[in-house]
Amino acid sequence: MTAGTSLASSARHASRGDAMAGLARFGLASRAFVYLVIGWLAFQIALGHHSQQANQRGALAEIASNTGGTVLLWLLAVGFAAYAIWRLSEAAFGTAAEGNEKGPRAQSAIRGVIYAALSVSTFAFIAGSSQKGQSQQQASTTAKVMKHDFGRWLVGIVGIVVVIVGVAMIVEGVKKKFLKQLRTGEMSPTQSKVVTRLGMVGTVARGIVFAMAGVLVVIAAVQYDPNKSTGLDGALRTFAQAPAGPWILGALAVGLIAFGVYGFAMARWAKT
């Protein structure tokens, strides 16, 4: 290989790397914005002022209700697609933070598939092809699965997996494991401190909500009641119904907003 060929190959690799970094930043910023809206909706529910579902579909509906909302929804749909492409590329070629380890690559594959589905559902929302709320859709899907042999077992296993994912998020937040995904060396001491605090609070809150959503799925399987499986919105409303529920939900809402703000920091400093 000549020096010229080597330089051309390096330039192509650098160009692909820059493009992937751009997709990652765009996708992370889109995810961050949605979590800000979900946190805001959860806070409104805690105050008793809002009936909109505190989940991704509720966030999309809230965005659509404002001036210029449709344009923003298109940007978010493309952003989710960009996030999915980035995560799937990590699954294929290894992650920037942890190389070719199988665990992180598998996690990236799952996230890529989830956000690809979210991108499709956002485009469907824009097109108006689905009028059901996200909680209703999840309950309907759960009911269909439970009609089959071993369906309750499958639903229960999915719920347990979601609980485990939620607990893993809590551990990640408490132990600050998320920091290995960031270029912390480029931050000032103040920036590092603020981002760390936001990441801890946001990741723990997100983990608690995910774990509760998983618990509701398990309850749906045990009680043979698909209406118990109501996803993120159902988990947040369950907290609201507990003793001191509005305070608990308010704290979780602040945590989800913190995760959204942290998400913008991640878009700036993520290893890609």
Image: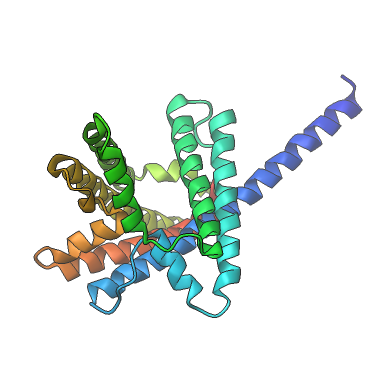
Q: Is residue 87 left or right of residue 170?
A: right
The image shows residue 3 at horizontal and vertical percentages of 89, 25
Q: Quadrant of residue 76?
A: bottom right
Q: How is the image coloured?
A: rainbow
Q: Is residue 109 left or right of residue 142?
A: right
Q: Is residue 168 left or right of residue 122?
A: left
220 up-or-down from 135: above or below: above
Camera sees residue 86: yes
Quadrant of the snapshot with the N terminus: top right
Quarter assignment of residue 20? top right
Q: Which residue shows up at 23% across the image and 77% down it?
A: 48
The residue under the point 18% across, 60% down is: 238
Position above or below: 26 against 165: below
Q: In the rendering, at what x and y percent does residue 260 appear?
A: 43, 61
- Label count reads 0
The C terminus sits in image quarter: top right
- Nearer to the camera, 151 or 214: 151
Decide which of 215, 96 is in the foreground and name it. 215
Which residue lies most toward the top here? Answer: 1
User: Seen from this angle, which residue lies furthest left?
Assistant: 243
Reply above or below: 193 against 42.
above
Visible residue check, residue 188: no
Residue 233 in the image: state x and y as whole percent. 29, 60
Q: Nearer the viewer, residue 212 or 90?
A: 212
Q: Residue furthest front?
A: 147
- Which residue is depicted at the point 35% across and 54% down? 137
Q: Residue at x 27, y 33 (%)?
A: 148
